[in-house]
Image: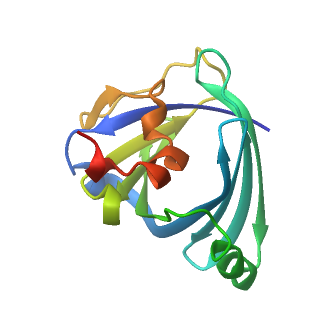
């Protein structure tokens, strides 16, 4: 139940040609405080409830609990969420033995594309595709919970 991931900006749309799947995602937050984010997500035709804890000192690891819930319940829970729903398409791209999840954002986060790779340990190595840009793992502005409150298009 510990999530270890690294996050990067994406420098081109070349990942789209390499993606083996893509899904539209709508998500909102019942709680967006850093100590415990509680997210409601609709991914394709499935609903999910996710609870995440605070990141460790390195910013790479944190507690994560997720359960699938009925889509109709997810739709109702989205109505209770804090202001600032995230709308994005997630592309999954296999690079070596890892899967990169590449999120292309819409609405108030239009223009932002972020890739994440989940790892088995904080020191695990992985292949870096040519479209992978600057690492932003330690920059909390790129957390979806932050983007829901302070959208990318409003940054100066």
Q: Where is residue 40 in the image (x, y as percent from the top left)?
A: 66, 64
Q: Position of residue 9 (x, y in %)?
A: 32, 37
The residue at 19%/45% (across/down) is 12
Does residue 94 lie above or below 67 as drawn? Answer: above
Closer-to-camera residue (96/72):
72
Res 119 seen here = yes
The residue at 41%/63% (across/down) is 88
| Quarter of the figure with the C terminus | top left
Closer-to-camera residue (127/47):
47
| Quarter of the figure with the N terminus | top right
The residue at 28%/49% (across/down) is 154
Closer-to-camera residue (130/115):
115
Q: Where is residue 18 in the image (x, y as percent from the top left)?
A: 32, 53
Does residue 82 lie above or below 6 as drawn? Answer: below
Res 96 seen here = no
Q: Where is residue 94 in the image (x, y as percent from the top left)?
A: 44, 45
Q: How many labels does the image show?
A: 0
Does residue 147 lie above or below 123 as drawn? Answer: below
The residue at 73%/62% (across/down) is 49
Instruction: Specify the color scheme.
Output: rainbow
């Amino acid at each position: 139940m510990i999530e270890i991931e690294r996050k990067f900006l994406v420098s081109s749309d070349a990942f789209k040609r390499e993606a083996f799947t893509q899904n539209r995602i709508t998500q909102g937050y019942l709680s967006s405080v850093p100590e415990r984010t509680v997210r409601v997500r609709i991914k394709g035709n499935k609903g999910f409830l996710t609870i995440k804890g605070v990141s460790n000192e390195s910013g790479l690891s944190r507690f994560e609990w997720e359960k699938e819930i009925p889509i109709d319940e997810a739709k109702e829970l989205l109505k209770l969420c804090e202001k600032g729903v995230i709308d994005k398409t997630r592309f999954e791209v296999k690079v070596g033995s890892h899967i990169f999840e590449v999120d292309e954002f819409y609405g108030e986060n239009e223009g932002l594309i972020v890739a994440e790779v989940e790892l088995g340990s904080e020191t695990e190595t992985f292949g870096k595709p040519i479209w992978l840009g600057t690492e932003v793992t330690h920059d909390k502005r790129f957390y979806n919970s932050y983007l829901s409150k302070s959208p990318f298009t409003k940054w100066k």
